[in-house]
Image (cartoon, coloured by chain):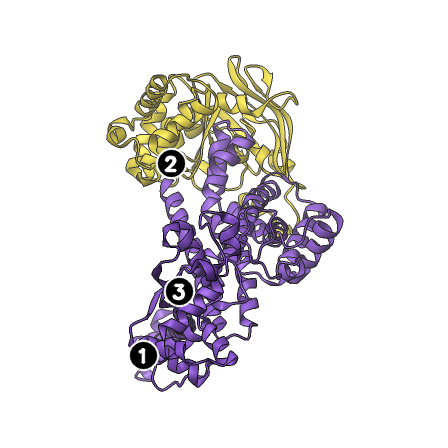
Chain colours: A purple, B yellow
């Protein structure tokens, strides 16, 4: 046989090796092309990610810094309308606005003499955040002896001032905010006098939502998301793994289990808003739970995450080699011992991967939360699972809808916080998988 | 290759007629030849039939396995010898579609009795598999697992003793005593198989089943396992399934020849290999098929 083929190729003056070599170049080109497609795909992905991140960080980094204005504030007892700075009631009801107005006017000596029209007075007053009264109150409370004295205090600037100050450094992009020319002049004077500084925006992390951007924070949404995630992890992980173990290791193969399997797969594909409707109908409608609470949110997200966890856990259990089961059974281990000592520990890294993907999805889920009322404007930071709260993605949705310019950077900043949360979770998953994998 | 059309038809039953072979023609339906029965049997199998769904894998097999003997089971691929072995400690229970009929006794008690719990049964009848399958845990944990789950020990020192003793019996101690807590899966194939044997004998079973324990090993590792079997047979009853006739001849005291789910011949090993009674046994050991 081989003799004949050599002869026939020799007659065409092409040996087998010639044919192989001719094809070899073609094959190598195809290999290179194939590898190039792969690299191209990865580069494309990276480029998109880079654009996304640079856009978000470019827009959002400003939100982590807040402009403050230094003013010489005189705690005039008469203006404050108080007599005793240690009395809580008096402190709560003091007229701080008058003190701030006085400080603003005295800050610019020229203004004190001239009789300022009401409109301009209001414009001047609006340069300082309405939340500044709370800082005055804190100062006076901590140091009652400062009553009737002049103290130098850094006060949070209004969001429009904040915007304007941040735009000064940026050339090419003119300021397009809401400050009048007169207001801009006042601010510029402060900048020249060094009465303006940028500090880290702690408010963003310590406060709940607010109508005023400079007082708005993500604490409420962050805690809401955290509580919901705790409920979701606490419920869906054990339930999902138990279901997967039962279906894989114990359940007989029959019509009923086939039916269950098909339904679990279907549930994984159900749009999340449907789960929101379900939560609305069952938890709020039937069980009469309050709206907007993390407990209901967590329950809805649990329902949504369960199919993902069950499917990935079953796949992980299936991947445990049967030789390990045989070995344990052969030693006389009972079914439960085989499952608990061998199958579940070996499947755990795979189960965790699936579960964390599910939790990450749940963390970023917005639609079902809209249905159960977590889209409400929540100022207070929730103290427990039954306090009304918002969630990070919902907060992003709400801020993206707000007209104030300062909310644009806060929206991006909230996205950054959400992404950081997600990256931390995924990092934890990788670490856990690595640790568990090594432990065996 | 061989001119005897009878053997060809046995080898490939559908070749000529397209019909399943009539075993009665070839003496397959008759009683097993040789000496399948014994007075001092440790385990006795009577009229065993095994089905996978509708397919019958074992046809009416009866066999006694003596105390402290090494019983080798040989035969061509798919002859049912592994299935038969797994029936001896009910490992077939883990296969959903497997049905077992007949009686298997261990010390004259039927292990297929509905009140028989498989957990103590498998503690008494251990099994070593074809592919080394140590748990992905430390060497120590692998050996200690059986005694732990059966609650054989109460103190750590006792457990240490059992682990060392088992590893010594499996002639693995000297190689691993310095790294008892490194993963069992890091060992070489032959060491892994000896670890599996140590794991099995740590429970002190009365019978050890071995399902082609050397088929995944190189000749040197095989030789070590075979030496080990000779030593173990002093304390344990061993039933081994093997593909290698040489191995059966080297390690066993008695040999059973299986063919297409039937037990053809059982005799002393020497007798089977030098003077087989049945024509099928002869054909197999002389290499005419298998």
- The residue carrying mark 1 is A25
Q: Can residue A86 be seen in this view?
A: yes
Q: Residues within 10 Å of mark 3 (few under 14, many from 20)?
A: many
For the point 40% across and 81% down, the residue is A184
Q: Taking B202 as reference, is A54 above or below it? A: below
Secondary structure beneath dot 1 equals helix
- The residue carrying mark 2 is B137
Task: In the displayed orientation, state which residue is furthest to the top.
Answer: B39
For the point 39% across and 20% down, the residue is B233
For the point 53% across and 61% down, the residue is A209
Spatial CA distance of label 2 from label 3 is: 62 Å
Along the line of sight, which residue is nearer the eye, B214 or A426? A426
Q: Where is residue A342 in the image (x, y as percent from the top left)?
A: 47, 37
Spatial CA distance of label 1 from label 2 is: 48 Å
Callouts 3 and 1 on one subunit? yes
Q: Taking A368 as reference, is B221 above or below it? A: above
Q: Position of residue B206 (x, y in %)?
A: 46, 18
Q: Where is residue B73 in the image (x, y as percent from the top left)?
A: 47, 31
- Kindly identify which chain the residue marked by label 1 belongs to: A
Spatial CA distance of label 3 from label 1 is: 73 Å
- The residue carrying mark 3 is A155
Q: Taking A232 as reference, is B122 above or below it? A: above
Along the line of sight, which residue is nearer the eye, A333 or A51? A51
- Kindly identify which chain the residue marked by label 2 belongs to: B
Q: Quadrant of residue A438?
A: top left
Q: In this view, does A81 lie to the left or right of B156?
A: right
Say how many tags the image has. 3
Q: Are marks 2 and 3 in contact (CB under 8 Å)?
A: no
Q: Where is residue A270 in the image (x, y as percent from the top left)?
A: 65, 60
């Amino acid at each position: 046989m081989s003799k004949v083929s050599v002869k026939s190729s020799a007659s065409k003056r092409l040996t087998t090796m010639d044919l192989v070599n001719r094809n070899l170049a073609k094959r190598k080109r195809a290999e290179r092309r194939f590898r190039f497609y792969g690299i191209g795909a990865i580069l494309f992905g990276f480029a998109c990610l880079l654009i996304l991140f640079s856009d978000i960080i470019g827009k959002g980094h400003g939100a982590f810094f807040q402009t403050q204005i230094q003013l010489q504030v005189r705690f005039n007892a008469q203006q404050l309308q108080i007599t005793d700075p240690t009395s809580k009631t008096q402190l709560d009801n003091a007229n701080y606005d008058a003190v701030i107005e006085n400080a603003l006017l005295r800050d610019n000596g020229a203004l004190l003499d001239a009789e300022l029209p009401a409109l301009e007075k209001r414009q001047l007053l609006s340069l300082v955040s309405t939340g500044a009264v709370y800082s005055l109150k804190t100062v006076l409370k901590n140091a009652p002896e400062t009553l009737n004295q002049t103290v130098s205090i850094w006060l949070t600037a209004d969001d429009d001032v904040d915007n304007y100050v941040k735009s000064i450094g940026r050339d090419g992009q003119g300021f397009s905010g809401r400050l009048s020319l007169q207001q801009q002049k006042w601010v510029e004077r402060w900048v020249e006098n060094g009465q303006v500084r940028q500090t880290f925006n702690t408010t963003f992390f310590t406060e709940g939502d607010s109508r005023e951007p400079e007082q708005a924070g993500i604490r409420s949404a962050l805690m809401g998301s955290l509580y919901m995630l705790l409920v979701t992890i606490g419920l869906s992980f054990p339930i999902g793994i138990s279901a997967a173990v039962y279906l894989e290791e114990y359940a007989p193969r029959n019509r009923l289990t086939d039916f269950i399997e098909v339904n679990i797969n279907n549930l994984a594909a159900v749009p999340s808003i449907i789960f929101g409707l379900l939560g609305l109908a069952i938890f709020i409608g039937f069980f009469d739970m309050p709206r907007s609470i993390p407990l209901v949110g967590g329950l809805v997200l649990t329902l949504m995450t369960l199919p993902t966890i069950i499917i990935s856990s079953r796949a992980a259990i299936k991947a445990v080699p049967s030789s390990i089961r045989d070995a344990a059974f052969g030693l006389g281990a009972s079914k439960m011992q085989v499952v608990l000592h061998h199958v579940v520990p070996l499947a755990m890294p795979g189960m965790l991967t699936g579960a964390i993907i599910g939790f990450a999805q749940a963390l970023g889920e917005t639609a079902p939360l809209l249905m159960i009322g977590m889209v409400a404007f929540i100022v207070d930071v929730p103290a427990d699972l039954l306090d009304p709260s918002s969630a990070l993605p919902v907060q992003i949705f709400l801020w993206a809808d707000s007209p104030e310019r300062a909310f644009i950077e806060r929206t991006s900043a909230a996205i950054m916080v959400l992404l950081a949360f997600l990256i931390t979770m995924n990092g934890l998953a990788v670490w856990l998988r690595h640790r568990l994998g090594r432990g065996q | 290759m061989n001119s005897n059309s009878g053997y060809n038809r046995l080898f490939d039953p559908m070749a000529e007629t397209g019909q399943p072979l009539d075993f009665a023609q070839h003496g397959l339906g008759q009683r097993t030849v040789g000496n399948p029965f014994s007075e001092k049997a440790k385990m006795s199998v009577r009229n065993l039939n095994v089905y996978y769904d509708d397919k019958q894998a074992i046809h009416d097999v009866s066999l006694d396995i003596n105390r402290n003997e090494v019983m080798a089971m040989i035969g061509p691929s798919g002859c049912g010898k592994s299935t038969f072995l797994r029936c001896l400690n009910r490992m077939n229970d883990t296969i959903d579609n497997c049905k077992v009929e007949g009686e298997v006794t261990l010390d004259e008690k039927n292990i297929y009795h509905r009140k028989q719990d498989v957990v103590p049964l498998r503690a008494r009848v251990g099994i070593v598999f074809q592919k080394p399958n140590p748990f992905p845990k430390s060497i120590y944990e692998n050996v200690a697992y059986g005694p732990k789950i059966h609650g054989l020990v109460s103190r750590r020192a006792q457990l240490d003793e059992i682990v060392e003793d088992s590893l010594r019996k499996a002639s693995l101690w000297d190689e691993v005593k310095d790294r008892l807590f490194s993963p069992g899966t890091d060992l070489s194939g032959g060491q892994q198989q000896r670890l599996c044997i140590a794991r099995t004998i740590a429970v002190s079973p009365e019978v050890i089943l071995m399902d082609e324990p050397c088929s995944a090993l190189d000749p040197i590792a095989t030789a070590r396992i075979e030496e080990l079997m000779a030593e173990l047979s002093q304390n344990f009853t061993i039933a081994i399934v093997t593909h290698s006739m040489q191995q059966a001849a080297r390690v066993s005291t008695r040999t059973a020849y299986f063919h297409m789910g039937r037990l053809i011949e059982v005799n002393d090993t020497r007798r089977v290999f030098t003077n087989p009674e049945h024509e099928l046994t002869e054909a197999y050991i002389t290499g005419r098929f298998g």
